[in-house]
Amino acid sequence: MRLLNFHAAGATHLGLVDGDSVLDLTAASGGRVEFASVTSWLRGGAAAKGEAERLLRQWRAARVKGRPLTTLEHAPLVARDVRIFCVGLNYADHAAENNLPPPSSPIFFTKLASVVIPHGTPIPLPAVGSLVDYEAEVAFVLGAPASRLTEQESGACIAGYTIMNDVTARDLQRQDQQWFRSKNCNGFGPMGPWLVTADEIADPANLDVALRLNGSTGTPAGIGAKQTPPVFLQPGDRMEIEVESVGILRNSVGTRGDA
């Protein structure tokens, strides 16, 4: 299944993508709390997943016309109380272009959920930090509490996958000698366009990932800072991150001083 959040009548609704149409699960469920958003649905566990599948079957049988996918106004994919953990230098090619060996242990940092913006929303450029860069990432979405797991146990906690653009102000990253401020300016977390449930992706460790900036391809190896000459985001730029079996996350770049 592919699930997303969208704006409708001044509120956030949960949608289930079926081809080029979207089933409004919030409305179809009669407003049940577990169908208020993607995060609420994840917290509903197996019962919420089963009910979503039942509503989809019912909808298809009735041949009810859904909302056109292309006309939806996407809402942020995650709630503001979730935690987003990131791993630095997580692609071997990305480590190589920085002239660094792959880390012997994971380098963790965080993105605030409040910086997440949805598919189709312009990325604001900050008033401070002029060297704004991009990184294409596959985001693993946990659907259950997880602690002290073995590698073999961890897969059972993954509810699905989405796409994230790890937007970074490289000049702030260099000034601060750590990554928090440079990766958490307002709007520096484009995510979407939807959550794809884990059962739809057989081998998440082997997905093709590409980012196109105004039609040119980059990242995981090919961040703007490592181009010759360096390429940083400018107002009006258009980005697409495509991940095999997940979809395409599209965002333009807004004006400077918006963040």
Image (tube, rainbow, N blue to C red):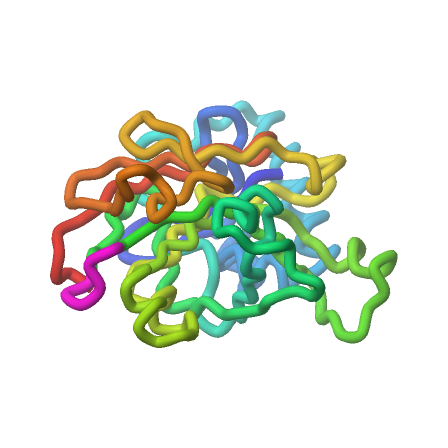
Query: How far across and how far down the image is residue 253, in percent?
Result: 22, 45
Count of numbered circles on the image? 0
Q: Foreground residue, 13 or 27?
A: 13
User: Which quadrant is home to the N terminus?
Assistant: top right
**For residue 2, which quarter of the picture?**
top right
| Depicted 15 relative to depicted 186: above or below | above
Q: Foreground residue, 203 or 90?
A: 90
Residue at horizontal 30 percent and vertical 73 percent from the top: 175
Query: Residue 64 colored magenta?
Result: no
Query: How far across and how far down the image is residue 71, in percent?
Result: 30, 33
Tell me if I can see residue 216 in this picture: yes
- Describe residue 243's horizontal placement relative to residue 124 as left or right: right
Tell me if I can see residue 27 in this picture: no
Q: Which residues are magenta?
A: 126-131
Residue at horizontal 62 percent and vertical 25 percent from the top: 61
Q: Foreground residue, 94 or 254?
A: 94
Residue at horizontal 22 percent and vertical 55 percent from the top: 124
Query: How far across and how far down the image is residue 11, in percent?
Result: 33, 58
**For residue 202, which quarter of the picture?**
top right
- Describe residue 121's horizontal placement relative to residue 31 as left or right: left
State whether the magenta stretch is mostly helix, strand or loop: loop
**Furthest-front residue in view?**
99
Query: Residue 127 colored magenta?
Result: yes
Residue at horizontal 38 percent and vertical 64 percent from the top: 183
- Describe residue 183's horizontal placement relative to residue 149 as left or right: left
Q: Foreground residue, 239 or 75?
A: 239
Query: How far across and how far down the image is residue 31, in percent?
Result: 49, 58
| Depicted 34 relative to depicted 175: above or below | above
- Describe residue 125's horizontal placement relative to residue 189 as left or right: left
